[in-house]
Image (cartoon, coloured by chain):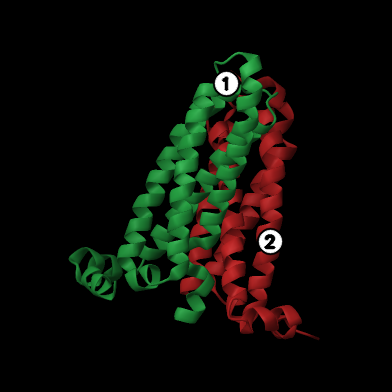
Chain colours: A green, B red
Amino acid sequence: MIAFIQWLQSTPLSLSVRRISWLIPMMQTLHILANGLVLAAIIMIDLRVWRRAGAEPLADRVRRLLPWLWSALGVLTVTGLVLVLGTPRRTLLDPTFQVKMLIMVVAIVATVVLATMLRRVVPEPASARRMTGLLASVAGAATLLLWLGATIAGRGRWIANVIG
Amino acid sequence: MPSITDALHWVEQTPAGAFVSHSTWGFSALLSVHILAVAIVFGMIAMVDLRLIGICGRQSAVTALCREALPWTWSAFALSALTGMLLFTAQPVKYWGNDAFRMKFAILALAGLNMLVFQLITYRGVARWDRDTAVPWAGRLAGAISLASWIAIVAYGRWTAYLMI
């Protein structure tokens, strides 16, 4: 891992990321903003899944918010990669970062499962909907919890002080 | 008469200040929760702002959206304020003199004022543009100001850390 980090640090791309002083704070800002959009999109979808009566039908909300969710996830990935390039030692050597990556992968899988589930729930008759509805409620809650966990574990802030 | 500097030094010596600045994990843990809370505030506010500006969801009622989003937004805001105050106690004098920190709060005040004007004036006529019609310019402007303010608040919040060293 150390050798990989040293190689990564010596790449021209990593060097330029670190040379531009405002790039890292800007990427962090975009990362936080995109993270907020992912969380909010899931909260808004969950609110519909949990309490089904409401102004906007679940199907409409899912169709409207999923593109935002995936785009925000794209921004999150790109800015995250730039941040790893800029600070490989701080991220890759940090156990919290590995925990975060793990939670994140599970969270993405959960999001895909939830999205597939919701797309299938909507056109079904009411009798079948109740069972899937309960499942979807649990899946919605689990997805939100996983994303909250991934955010909290964020880039090893927990032990940043110890490693420095 | 006690000055602001005296007050800041006093804050530093409170048990909260002592804990946050001396504990190895206290500051990091609070910062993680603070950033999570601010991210949720931004995301939820953005949902409403984007609807006001007219970028998404014209079919859904503005009132219903606000009713749904508000409890989450305010809870997250309360959490961010609480964690923010505790983070502040770690180095009150330095934060007070930090230009990015000052900008962050100036913009937060602007966002608050914008929200107040929107709630007290523009939102009163919401029945006329609740759904399927265009939001009046005052509402769209409020949405745009709010969105820009919150992006700036996050940016200056992050920038604050770089001016602390």
Image coordinates for residue A107, horizontal then vertical, percent:
49, 47
Quadrant in which the N terminus of chain A is drawn: bottom left
The amino acid type found where label 2 is placed reads Ala
Q: Nearer the viewer, residue A38 or B38?
A: A38
Write the residue at 73% across / 86% down: B13
Q: Nearer the viewer, residue A129 or B104?
A: A129
Write the residue at 62% across / 53% down: B110
Q: Residue furthest top?
A: A125
The image quarter in which residue A13 lies: bottom left
Quadrant in which the C terminus of chain A is drawn: bottom left
Compared to residue A9, the image places residue A125 above or below, namely above
Q: Secondary structure at mark 2?
A: helix
Which residue is labeled 1 in the image? B59
Q: Is residue B118 visible?
A: yes
Image coordinates for residue B115, horizontal then vertical, percent:
67, 44
Write the residue at 43% across / 57% down: A101
Q: Which mark is residue B81?
A: 2
